[in-house]
Amino acid sequence: MPTPQGKPSRSPRAPRTPRDAAGPKRATVQEVAEAAGVSTATVSRVLNGNYPVAAETRRKVEQAVRNLGYVVNAHARALAGSRTRTVGIIVQDIIDPFYTFIAHGVQRQAAEDGKLCLVCSTYGVVGGELDLIDALHEQRADAVILVGGGVDDPAYRRKLADRARALGREGSWLVLCGRPALEPGVPAGVVDYDNAGGAHAITDYLLGLGHRRILYVGGPEQLSVHQARVAGFRRAHASRGLEVDERLIQPGTFSRRFGYERVTQLLRDGSAGEFTAVFGANDGVAVGVMQALREAGLRVPQDVSVVGYDDIPLAAEVTPALTTVHLPLEQMGREAVRLAVALRGESDGPTDTRHVGTHVVIRDSTAPPPDPAS
Amino acid sequence: MPTPQGKPSRSPRAPRTPRDAAGPKRATVQEVAEAAGVSTATVSRVLNGNYPVAAETRRKVEQAVRNLGYVVNAHARALAGSRTRTVGIIVQDIIDPFYTFIAHGVQRQAAEDGKLCLVCSTYGVVGGELDLIDALHEQRADAVILVGGGVDDPAYRRKLADRARALGREGSWLVLCGRPALEPGVPAGVVDYDNAGGAHAITDYLLGLGHRRILYVGGPEQLSVHQARVAGFRRAHASRGLEVDERLIQPGTFSRRFGYERVTQLLRDGSAGEFTAVFGANDGVAVGVMQALREAGLRVPQDVSVVGYDDIPLAAEVTPALTTVHLPLEQMGREAVRLAVALRGESDGPTDTRHVGTHVVIRDSTAPPPDPAS
DNA sequence: CTGAAAGCGCTTACAG
DNA sequence: CTGAAAGCGCTTACAG
């Protein structure tokens, strides 16, 4: 028969006497109050500094706090008050620089606002996001920041909306970072950047150099981010009245390895036809592509140009340095926290959105095609 | 005059009626209990699954939970129970791959144990560690994991020991990851790897190739990690009866930029004398060194060999791939969580230590010196 | 400027 | 297997 797993724990009926053990026990407001000769209310006021307290009283309390080594219990505080001074962030994998930098921004901004940061990774587990939102809801995080492209399936969006409403009832906010907004009326903030626009701009840059057959490699097909980037890629062609050979669009994943393997294969079997430039769905993919080209004896950019997306530090560090679309990753994280803070100011405000800018960074991996068209 | 910053908030005297607002309000155990026609104790038992409950009762409760969209309040749970199912981790900078990978391990292991992870970065702020330990103490984290080399100053160690004892009184544990243990008797765990041994091994490898003048670059002098690595470097020389020219030891920071700048400078002014190999204090420094050598027209490894330490993924990705000391970073993070969990099993156990293995990984950045000394 | 007291939402030793 | 009730450690509207 299962029994409570507790150690020889305290009995509520007979609370342990704080002083029966060797050494100082952990103190409570109660004890600080006694030591300082004031009420617990006064101790609380000194600690929070949000009510006027006489200088002398304050001194006595601070003294007592120091003597007893008192450390406030955040859980009691959260339960009695209402805010937890905690924000949660959910990413796919904290190891991926894209997420690491956003998480970094979230953390810095949170720290500046005096908040702590609960960081969670889904590691690609299906439904992981939903479970983690629930976990952060249990923690009553002041805000839950969901980072990265999402599946754009109506049923899934409905589940997300339910979570957002549940958090909203708690006075907390869901903030989507890098994925499209939920339906109007759902209490969720959005920090977004222009995937379609960035993809359009960098594709147009390649077209302007004279490239006519550009391979688009990588990105999970169901992801909103991928869809928007491909849309921008197509639109750039359409703006110039060019057709896109569908064989040149090769979705997959966001990994370096995918870029490497797919291009190696296409080079071998020629199933995508010729191409003079490659658009990697993100920088990691692009770096894998460059490796594949190099191993096939092709020079970047003399024989084939390569571009990426995101502008993680790696992009500037590889040789040749990668032309890519710059995303202000840290700023996005910061913006998400700021937005959540701003939203908490309203009791029932409308869905709010913040856009961050994007621009093409031209480095050394792009050049006109070897045998310019037009 | 300052006034409480509250919104039009609830009065404790007249608690809001859960149903006076539009839409479902957030539910409590109390309400779940009423809806299911049982006591709050029973609801709690069903939720925690740690006591026997009749199947039919369980069903009714689960039904009510679902209908009301009930989400337990972790703070109330933490206050009433004792564990928080939360671990805290403190690193210097989550952007640095060394820390990112350890944090990753912590997070994965924590997730597997059903815990959430509070991630904090000090960003090199003096005293930041101490403040963050306090913050995590406030949160009553089940464990506080402090990652990275520490300053080995007695006063600082004493402060750390005080924090460890304070946490210990709470039933929580401080775990040091990659830094030396505190005095015996202080309730702190340690997950360590052999800095001196790894440095000895890779230095000996270079000496074995015939190198006699090896430059050691980078690492903050006050840090325990740096001191241990230099000690291993010296010991390797001593074992072979070789003297170390002090000019060859060039401490600094752990950054790529430092490696680049210092070597560029030494190459220019010759103030460290000649050298045929460079030991970067970590992989980042080593990569910076390689860049400086390349720009000076020196080939790696034909003219100069280069080694690093840590074996972050970058080491395998640069060209030439870097010979380095492999550290099982993710495993260290996991080990730290496991250790904390194990330690919580004991009420007052001794300081416990876990060592993880280290080994040299030979890649393409090392070769015999161009004009081998004997 | 300060205190007495209620209430935050759970868990668990007791007592059936 | 289940319920009544105490207690976890704070904060804050009231009432001086």
Image: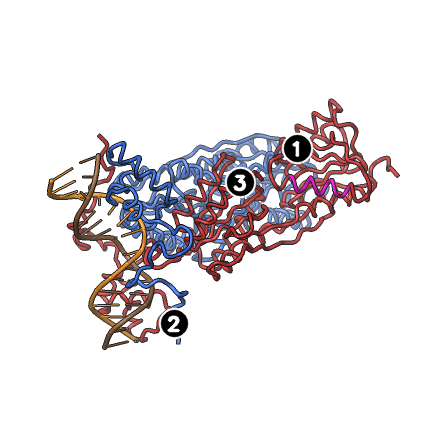
Chain colours: A red, B blue, C orange, D brown
Q: Which residue is mark 3?
A: A95
Q: Is residue B184 visible?
A: no
Residue B202 magenta:
no
- Of badges 3 and 2, the one in the foreground is 2
Circles 3 and 1 on the same subunit: yes
**Three-letter code for the amino acid on which mark 3 is drawn:** Ile
**In the image, what residue type sits under mark 1?**
Pro
Provide the residue span drawn in magenta: A227-237
Q: Secondary structure at mark 1?
A: loop
Element type where label 2 sits in the image:
loop
Q: Dot 3, how many residues are within 10 Å of its Cα: few (below 14), some (14-19), or many (20+)?
A: many
| Inter-mark Cα distance, 3 to 2 | 44 Å
Element carrying mark 3: loop
**Principal secondary structure, stretch drawn in magenta:** helix
Q: Position of residue A258 (x, y in %)?
A: 63, 31
- Residue underneath mark 2: B3
Q: Residue at x 24, y 42 (%)?
A: B38
Q: CA distance from mark 3 to mark 1?
A: 22 Å
